[in-house]
Image (cartoon, rainbow, N blue to C red):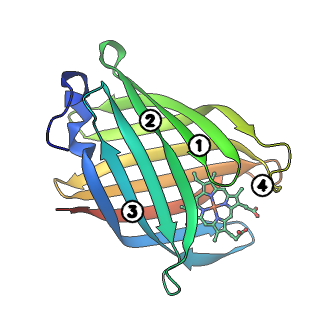
Amino acid sequence: ADYIHEALKPISWLAGRWYTVTGRGSYPNVREFGYHEELEFICLGQPMFNFLSISHHPEKGTAMHQERGFLRILPEKEKVALVVSHNIGLTTIEEGHYDSNLKEIKLASVSIARTSFSKPPHVTNLLREFVLLSPDTLQVTVFMKTDKKPLSQHLKAVYKKVE
Ligand code: HEM
């Protein structure tokens, strides 16, 4: 990510590739698990980041959850929208605000859709938070609600920037 579109200035701290130093997953009645994940926020000259997430099993190295999408920005309102397709047959549109001083982004799902044959339980709400802890350290937290379980933390990970 050499060139970053002017509109992305307030969230330019996200740009680049990130890799977990710690990734912990949890959910009610799910055994706590560790995972590795690569994240990408790449600007192709448009006023948005192309977003990619691929998680891996920490021992086996096999691919697990995956996401591809776009992080769009509306600087006039300090708003962002993450449009994502997940490999589990799910699409989420998440919207929220950024704080360019605190260097954080808070998103909440505004729309969720799934394939007719996606495996239950169904996700009904998703909250995501990105916080830059230092210029090369990113923290991501995800809370999730399903049609079976209340809003609970599913993911917490800390990443280092890949040079
Ligand atoms: C479980 C959704 C990201 C690993 C689940 C469940 C759902 C879900 C609906 C079932 C929960 C239950 O049985 O009550 C999502 C969504 C994600 C996400 C929407 C992204 C926002 C991840 C990531 C990993 C992961 C990044 C990393 C490896 C797991 C594991 C389980 C699980 C290991 C438990 C075993 C299983 O049921 O397959 N997730 N997940 N998830 N998720 Fe995620």
Rounded to the nearest whole Å, what is the CA distance between mark 4 and mark 1?
A: 22 Å
Rounded to the nearest whole Å, what is the CA distance between mark 4 and mark 3?
A: 28 Å
Q: Residues within 10 Å of mark 2 (few under 14, many from 20)?
A: some
Q: Which residue is mark 4?
A: 149
Residue 85's disc number:
1
For ligand 1, the image quadrant comes to bottom right
The image position of residue 47, as x and y in percent, is: 30, 24
For the residues labelled 4 and 1, say whether their Cβ atoms are less than 8 Å apart: no
The image position of residue 60, as x and y in percent, is: 53, 86
Q: Is residue 30 left or right of residue 121?
A: left
Pointer 3 or 1: first along the chain:
3
Q: Is residue 40 left or right of residue 53?
A: left
Pointer 1 or 2: first along the chain:
2
Q: Which residue is mark 3?
A: 38
Question: Would the CB of label 1 be found within 8 Å of ligand 1?
Answer: no
Pointer 4 or 3: first along the chain:
3
The image position of residue 101, as x and y in percent, is: 20, 34
Pointer 4 or 1: first along the chain:
1
144, above or below 55, in the image: above
Rounded to the nearest whole Å, what is the CA distance between mark 3 and mark 1?
A: 16 Å
Q: Secondary structure at mark 2?
A: strand
Q: Which residue is mark 2?
A: 70
